[in-house]
Image: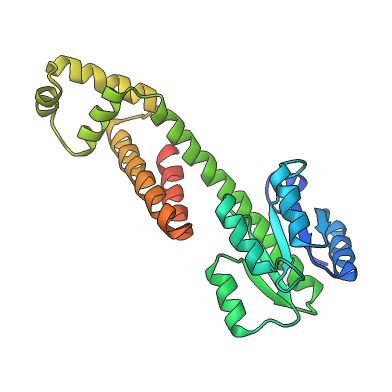
Amino acid sequence: MAAYAIGPGAQAASTVFVVDDDDSVREALQGLLTSVGLRSKAFATAQAFLEYDEADVGATASCLVVDIRMPGIGGLDLQSRLVQRRRVPPIIFMSAFGDVAMTVQAMKAGARDFLPKPFRDQDMLDAVCSALKYDEQMRALEKSRESLEERYRSLSDRERALLQMLGDGLMNKQIASRLCLSEITVKVGRRQLMQKMRARNFVQLIKMESLIRGLDNQKVRASYEGGANEVAYRLESAIARVLHE
């Protein structure tokens, strides 16, 4: 059996959640995951998982392995309910009755993989390993986004207006005229912006301003479309690159 190295310290912190109404499948999956050093928690129904998840107790899901057809709330319905709550952990669907249309629907909604039952142990482990690595990357990107938003929240209203004007390409003299300030005051404000945003140079500051606008646009889009995961991923990747320049 292959060795699984998820990432620095990630494997020890990762928890794989298994949701399946079949007792034997849950037991077999937990045994398989334990054999490679992964923690897991199992639920017989999607409702039980949702109640546990909503209570926000214990470990946070790093990966979900879910049967797509279950009594009550099915796998696709579970996925859609999680989307409404927060960022969805990577989901691996499994089913003995999967068809092409169902697979396409699951993948379009953001599933990481779709395995037919019965599946090979190696295929499941490969899928879980890939999902955990993806989750680790997404958590790092999310941390970068939160850092940028925290820096922006520390600015006063006038500092935010100044940052936006700089992002629009206005010169100090033009900004001073619009804000009824002296050019010296604008220059001092620029230095303060650099300090508060922790920008190493003016170019990085302007990149940050552009990304902040992108975050605002993405939030508006997500409120209408219920996600925009690919847009969010590209934006958060750009934020991580800029903050580490």
- Which residue is rendered at x = 31% and y = 19% of the image? 192
Residue 194 in which image quadrant: top left
* Residue 151 appears left or right of 81: left
Q: Position of residue 179 (x, y in %)?
A: 15, 23
Counting labels gives 0
Between 129 and 118, which is closer to the camera in this rendering? 118
Quarter holding the C terminus? top left
Q: Position of residue 216 (x, y in %)?
A: 36, 44
- Which residue is rendered at x = 71% and y = 48% of the image? 53
Residue 64 in which image quadrant: bottom right
Q: Position of residue 163 (x, y in %)?
A: 26, 31
Outermost residue toward the front in this view: 72
Residue 99 drawn above or below residue 16: below
Do we see residue 103 in this rendering? yes
- Which residue is rendered at x = 41% and y = 48% of the image? 219
Between 106 and 112, which is closer to the camera in this rendering? 106
Residue 3 drawn above or below residue 173: below
Q: How is the image coloured?
A: rainbow
Q: Position of residue 92 (x, y in %)?
A: 68, 66
Quarter holding the N terminus? bottom right
* Residue 116 appears left or right of 191: right
Do we see residue 9 in this rendering? no
Residue 181 in which image quadrant: top left
